[in-house]
Amino acid sequence: MILLNHDTSMTKEESSIANFVAAMDRIQVIGFNHNTIDLDAIGSMHISPDHIYDQLSRVKEVMNFSELVYLSTCNRVEFYLASDHEISKHHLAEFFTTLYEGKDVDFEPLSESAKIWTGINAVNHIIEVASSIDSMVIGEREIITQIKSAFDFSQKSGLSGDLMRLVEKQTIQTAKKVYNSTFIANKSVSVVGLAFKELMEIGVNGNSNILVVGAGATNKTMCKLLCENGVKNFTIFNRSVERGEALAKATNGKYFPLSELKNYTEPWDILVTCTASESAIITDEIYSVINPNDRKKVIVDMAIPNDVDPVVIEKNDIDYISIQHLKEISSNNLNERKKELLKVRQIIYEGVESFKDLFERREIERKLHFIPKQLKSIRERATQEIFSKDLESLDDRSKEVLDKVLNYMEKKYVGVPMKMAKELLTDKEKKK
């Protein structure tokens, strides 16, 4: 703001910036993650794939959003939207009530825990999420695929349009640059991934016999990795019959109740164990039964507390991969990833600046879009109203020539502002 003739007024440049900021403020984010709300609450906010379109369409219409994108992961739920009115905390109760209509959800704590980003801050946040510096595990690439899928679904479903398309374009482009130009995704920090890597280094192969104790998420992931690498001999022990049989089916293996482990005498090479037991599952007594020949074995113990009794490790020749060992490697790798954050933030900053230029071009093109219709309207008024009587006195040949002249001028005049706008943007970029 500057003072002119004792009046407070905006310069043209300030006015232009204000209009630009106001236009970009249409982009908004409503977000929750593991840092702001517990994972059970995030789980309650997930929408069934069969109902996503209906629920998003309803809230989009009621809240008068022009575009809406929904992102849901195991530790994050976010809504990316375009709206002519600013979303604030007091709008959130209506938002959640409409979105989760008929669902038993306590909306008050959700409204209190929600974080809201607006304008360029919203764009910066979305790019940070896609670049995995706002994730529970820094550098995990899976988030970029999840974000792309969320944007693509909304685009194909007609829930979003050109503005979110621009946001997606810049987000994916910047996130890919982050992963390709830095080491933020290098060196696995996943406990399962690290355990699998060590197994491969030891020498697991398609003929290896794998004994699996526990059928939870950790062991399911490990079995999937082993299957993808040609391992096909699995024996599953688990308390729950349903989960045990499901994992046995997924691996084409055999299932036995956990109570039968103490009687198992078939040959095996690698034991993978991860249960929720508070005491050791693989005791000295059980190990002497399942390894009667005293052959060297490999044990991967990813349980907390450990499933393998320390006595077993002390008394036997075992390549033992423990959760403590894996967590230490994971922590070291995570620290290495964190060292890349400065480079990552620089790339994100450049990406956000590029989005500003992209958005400005879009706004200019959008505002110039009316020019052809405006020229056509002026031409029709001139020929049909203002100069209609003069035109009546012209012969057919003269009318034909005039029509050609007007067509030529109309086309040329349409190109003039577009050319000027491009030149202005080019000059602006050169000055940066």
Image: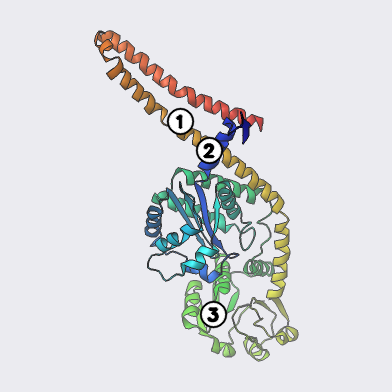
Q: Which mark is residue 19?
A: 2
Residue at screen point 70% across, 80% down: 296
What crowding class fits label 2: few (fewer than 14 Cα within 10 Å), some (14-19), or many (20 or more)?
Answer: few
Q: How many marks?
A: 3
Q: Is residue 9 left or right of residue 155?
A: right
Q: CA distance from mark 3 to mark 2?
A: 64 Å
* Quadrant of image for the N terminus: top right
Q: Nearer the viewer, residue 324 or 344?
A: 344
Q: Secondary structure at mark 2?
A: helix
Residue at 41% across, 21% down:
411
x and y percent of residue 90 in the render?
48, 59
- Write down the residue under mark 3: 236
| Residue 396 against residue 308 in the figure, above or below | above
Q: Nearer the viewer, residue 271 or 57?
A: 57
Is 271 located above or below residue 190 in the figure?
Answer: below
Secondary structure under the numbered disc 1 in the rendered image: helix
Q: CA distance from mark 3 to mark 1?
A: 66 Å
Is label 1 or label 2 in front?
Answer: 2
Camera sees residue 49? no
| Res 368 label | 1
Tag 3: Cα neighbours inside 10 Å, few (<14), some, or many (≥20)?
A: many
**Residue type highlighted by circle 3:** Ile
Which amino acid does the dot numbered 1 rest on?
Leu
Question: Gap between marks 1 and 2, in whole Å?
Answer: 16 Å
Indicate which disc, 3 or 1, sits on the residue closer to the N terminus: 3
Q: Which picture quadrant has residue 368?
A: top left
* Mark toward the start of the polypeptide (3 vs 2): 2
Residue 137 drawn above or below residue 275: above
Compared with residue 363, is residue 86 higher up or lower down, i.e. above or below? below
Q: Position of residue 14 (x, y in %)?
A: 59, 35
Q: Residue furthest right?
A: 314
Precedes in sequence: disc 1 or disc 2 = 2
